[in-house]
């Protein structure tokens, strides 16, 4: 029997559903922009381990992918990895790429993702990047059709600023954006100026990617000191700072089981309030981006 800590499950607006604060990112699993089949067995095994461990730890697993990743092969690997788990225990996020934001292409992309994922619905479908050459109204109308038909349970966006989020929401009539997936970390705080305050006011989840800045965050002296204080890894300190905030979820990518476990074990505890404040006040400009 799993004892769920609800502070590690972030609420979805206008719903009783919640999603885990830490998910499994899959960028470069299955290839970059073209398929890579060289490590399929290892990748599937790692994904299955992450899903199983997250379900064991918190009752659910969150996994993020996109049609862009490995030209769809990442979705195929996710589809293979999830097949032995109860579908309702895995919350799948995937994304439509920016060149496919015309109405009919959004519909086709979603159905193609369903086939690769070997599932009959997508939990959360995101616009991967905005495309100024395609009317946003057309894209959002297609997303709402997918929602109405039950192909997707929730819709959202990625890499949208506040102005675009506000515009996108005006084109929706029966549902709303529940997530904006953006780059956010201790070393990249640009979103704190406008995007995060707006999302928190509107109860939109912020899904943070690149939370460890490819390891740069782990080299900060303050992170190392806090890791020693808590008996945790530097990565867990940096990730816990993120998920300590309301409506912040993060999707670190890891291929090795020990790193996947380390990420998931970021849940179940919290930094003390004074240490969260210490990291909040970190002078990013002073420490640089080296």
Image (tube, rainbow, N blue to C red):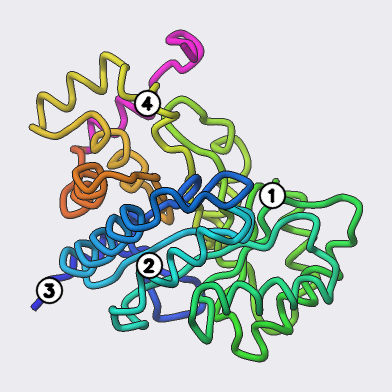
**Callouts 4 and 2 close, C-beta under 8 Å:** no
Left or right of 216? Residue 72 is right
According to the picture, the residue beneath numbered tag 2 turns out to be 19
Query: Label 1: how many residues lie within 10 Å, few (<14), some (14-19) or many (20+)?
Result: some
Residue at image position (69%, 49%) is 160
Q: Which mark is residue 273?
A: none
- Among the two numbered marks 2 and 3 on one chain, the one whose residue lies closer to the N terminus: 3
SS type, badge 3: loop
Left or right of 148? Residue 106 is right
- Among the two numbered marks 3 and 1 on one chain, the one whose residue lies closer to the N terminus: 3
- Separation of disc 4 and disc 1 at Cα? 25 Å
| Most foreground residue, 58 or 39 | 39
| Most foreground residue, 107 or 194 | 107
Q: Quadrant of residue 238?
A: top left
SS type, badge 4: helix
Query: Label 4: how many residues lie within 10 Å, few (<14), some (14-19) or many (20+)?
Result: few
According to the picture, the residue beneath numbered tag 1 turns out to be 160
Residue 191 image offset from top left, x and y in percent = 57, 38
Range shown magenta: 273-290
Query: Label 2: how many residues lie within 10 Å, few (<14), some (14-19) or many (20+)?
Result: many
Relative height, residue 133 to residue 107 (above, below): above
Relative height, residue 79 to residue 132 (above, below): below
Residue at image position (38%, 67%) is 19
- Among the two numbered marks 4 and 3 on one chain, the one whose residue lies closer to the N terminus: 3
Please identify, in this view, whether the residue under mark 4 or under mark 3 is nearer the observer.
Answer: 4
Q: Quadrant of residue 227?
A: top left
């Amino acid at each position: 029997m799993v004892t769920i800590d609800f502070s590690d499950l972030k609420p979805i607006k206008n719903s009783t559903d919640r999603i885990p604060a830490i998910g499994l990112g899959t960028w470069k699993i299955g290839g970059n922009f073209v398929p890579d089949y060289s490590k399929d067995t290892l990748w599937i095994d790692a994904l299955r381990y992450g899903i199983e461990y997250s379900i064991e730890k918190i009752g659910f697993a969150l996994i993020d992918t996109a049609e862009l990743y490995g030209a769809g092969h990442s979705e195929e690997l996710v589809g293979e990895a999830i097949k032995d788990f109860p579908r309702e225990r895995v919350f799948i996020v995937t994304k439509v790429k920016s060149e496919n934001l015309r109405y009919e292409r959004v519909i086709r992309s979603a159905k193609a993702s369903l086939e690769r994922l070997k599932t009959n619905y997508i939990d959360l479908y995101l616009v991967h990047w905005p495309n100024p050459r395609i009317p946003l109204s057309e894209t959002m109308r297609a997303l709402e059709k997918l929602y109405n038909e039950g192909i997707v349970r929730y819709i959202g966006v990625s890499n949208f600023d506040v102005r675009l989020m506000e515009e996108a929401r005006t084109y929706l009539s029966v549902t709303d954006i529940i997530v904006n997936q953006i780059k956010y970390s201790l070393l990249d705080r640009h979103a704190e100026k406008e995007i995060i305050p707006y999302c928190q006011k509107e109860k939109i989840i912020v899904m943070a990617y690149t939370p460890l800045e490819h390891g740069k965050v782990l080299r900060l002296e303050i992170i190392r000191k806090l890791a020693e204080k808590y008996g945790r890894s530097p990565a867990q300190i940096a990730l816990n700072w993120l998920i300590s905030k309301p409506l912040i979820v993060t999707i670190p990518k890891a291929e090795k089981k020990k790193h996947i476990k380390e990420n998931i074990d970021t849940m179940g505890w919290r930094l003390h309030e004074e240490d969260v404040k210490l990291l909040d006040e970190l002078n990013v400009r002073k420490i640089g981006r080296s």
